[in-house]
Image (cartoon, helix red, strand yellow):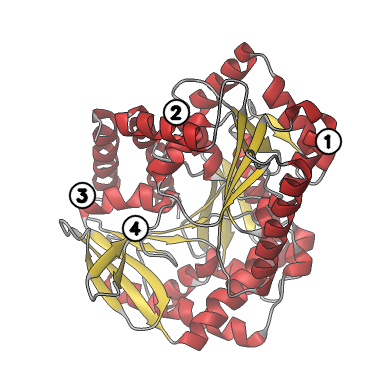
Amino acid sequence: MAVARIFAEETMQLLLTDLFPGARLIVAANRAPFRRVESQHGATLWQRPAGGVTAALDPLLRETGGVWFAAESGSEQDLAVPPEEPSYRVLVLGVPEDVYRGYYTGYANSGLWPLCHNLVERAHFHSRDWISYRQVNRMFAARIASVASAQDLVFVHDYQLALVPGYLRQLGYKGPIAHFWHIPWPPAVVLRLLPERRLLLQGLLQADWLGFQTQESVDAFASAAMAELGVTPCRDGHGLSLTYEGHVTRLAAAPISIDIQKIEELAATRLTQERMVKLREHLALGQEKSLLLGVDRLDYTKGIPARLEGYATLLSRYPSLVGKVQFLQIAVPTRTEISDYRRLAVSVRRRARELNRRFGLPSWPAVRLIEHNLRLDQLVALYRISDVAVVSSLYDGLNLVAKEYVAARIDEGGALCLSETAGAYEELPAAFPLSPLSSERVAESLARALFAPVEERKQRMRSLRAAVTQNTVHTWLGRVLSGVREATLIS
């Protein structure tokens, strides 16, 4: 581990102990930072899901101790982690299968997820799912309340657990509560389609600090709370606060980030250099050939079909690029129990085959499609050899792939085409802007990135890297901790 990373993690530890003396960090999130699974041969294996929340909070919990609450269908698990040197607990709540399905697949991901991404025609709400959603949120709150003291800091995450702050207060918990909403908060006219909107607002307004990825989401939430609940807003030198039933909640735009030092370290290793050489050979990338890269979960919010349409338009407009440009799309399956996601996977595969029939050559496919997850070290090598990374989300809370790509480009090479409707665009305006619903505009963005002079590409990448360096996962966590402390002082 580099000195810079050690310093950043130690700084977060000191900040926690300074702002909240004697506090443990109590995290609540749907997904755990570690999973214990049994292999086919009966051996115990450990999985470590990637993600910005894990990257930020796992090092802090290792140093200070605490508990991470998560949920799964099945039996409860009480894990001492990390497995090589246990220093904190992961308590995975065992939820009955039908209840978990209603909570997670139903209300959270067939209702809240599409609604908050303004894809209202995909959103479905059923009373049985709402019952399950409330039940699981109550389970979280009850287990947290059973172990947390008023000195601890409870940090709740995302749309799956919107009711937890309110339930914790009902159970008498008096300590500080932070909640971070990772996806977009919908505008008022869209929120009105949510039958239980008032109850979700009431639950979230029992947190002391409520964070969002963008100022747009902060403003949308504040407007909804004032319109639906008649809350009292107050602006001061620290930002916006809302008072509801005597409780004050501080709102903040605090875009999450990545461990840039870790990615830069990986990018500079000899193993990465060797992997880059092998990848170039495998993909037949020569001096006059270019690689476009997309890295996404196979989710309808990511705009992958429209991205492929834009790529087809690019090749149609510039036939000289046929045989010289290739699109590598990593599309990791997710939520396959939902029919919309299964249909999306079929559509993307079909479109990739069509593009290869139309533009591919015997030794040069126009599109390569990878439908499984890659480790971060593998992704970093791909980031390094890609001429253009394409993030064409229809609507995104943030998008950490854009930041990972920039962090990996320690050579100041490459180019980023970034959707203007991804939350990350607020921080990364030096990217080549992309309008995801127009195949012509997508093609224009790709062409600008491919044909831009080397110095322009380098200048843009330098600006992007400066922005990513200023807001790392550690500075994000520092903003959260400081914000919660300020919020508790005014409440």
Give the residue type at disc 4: Arg
Q: Earlier in the sequence, mark 2 or mark 3?
A: 3
Discs 4, 2 touching: Cβ within 8 Å: no
Q: Earlier in the sequence, mark 4 or mark 2?
A: 4
Position of residue 289 measured from the top left corner of the image (x, y, whole percent): 62, 26
**Residue at image point 67% right, 47% down:** 393
Give the residue type at disc 2: Thr
Circle 4 packing at 10 Å, graded few (<14), some (14-19), many (20+), is few
Give the residue type at disc 1: Ser
Residue placed under numbered mark 1 in the picture: 316
Circle 1 packing at 10 Å, graded few (<14), some (14-19), many (20+), is some
Q: CA distance from mark 4 to mark 1?
A: 42 Å
Instruction: Give above or below for 380 relative to 169.
Output: above
Position of residue 360 measured from the top left corner of the image (x, y, whole percent): 71, 42
Position of residue 213 measured from the top left corner of the image (x, y, whole percent): 56, 47
Q: Secondary structure at mark 1?
A: helix
User: Which image quadrant for residue 104?
Assistant: bottom right
Q: CA distance from mark 4 to mark 3?
A: 18 Å
Q: CA distance from mark 4 to mark 2?
A: 25 Å
Circle 2 packing at 10 Å, graded few (<14), some (14-19), many (20+), is some
Give the residue type at disc 3: Glu
Q: CA distance from mark 1 to mark 2?
A: 38 Å
Residue placed under numbered mark 4 in the picture: 48
Residue placed under numbered mark 2 in the picture: 469
**Residue at image point 25% right, 31% down:** 2
Discs 4, 1 touching: Cβ within 8 Å: no
Q: Nearer the viewer, mark 4 or mark 2?
A: 4
